[in-house]
Amino acid sequence: MIDEHPARTATALRRLSRLPRLGVFLGTLALALATFFTPGIAGAALVGLLAAGAAALITHTWNHRTPGGRALRLLVFAVLLLIAVSKVW
């Protein structure tokens, strides 16, 4: 994937790296728990939001990961997509 706005991406990643890690973890955990307990389309939309965030991080950190790390991240992404699809049905 070619980054059309490398300066904007670098700025966003710098801001993300300055956030407190515990806060980011707790926020993501709260969103994940909300997605699993919210039924239907709303739950699918929340899982889609998690999947979109995961996809953004995967694409921007791809070159810095080992093949095993890449595979694990793709597996998590695929599981999120499966959960989203299952919530719609």
Image: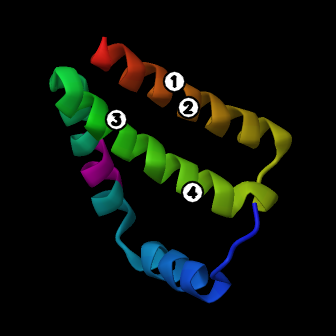
**Residue 15 as seen in the image, left or right of residue 9:** left
Q: Amino acid at mark 1?
A: Val
Circle 4 residue: 57
Give the answer, above or below, for where 5 lies relative to 76.
below
Q: Nearer the viewer, residue 41 or 80?
A: 41
Q: Earlier in the sequence, mark 2 or mark 4?
A: 4
Q: Amino acid at mark 4?
A: Leu
Q: Amino acid at mark 3?
A: Val
Where on the picture, by quarter, is residue 29? top left
Q: Which contiguous range is marked in magenta?
A: 25-29
Residue at horizontal 35 percent and vertical 52 percent from the top: 25
Give the answer, above or below, for where 60 lies relative to 55.
below
Circle 2 residue: 76
Circle 1 residue: 79
Q: Secondary structure at mark 1?
A: helix
Provide residue 76's location: percent of width, then percent of height: 55, 31
Q: CA distance from mark 1 to mark 4?
A: 16 Å
Circle 3 residue: 47
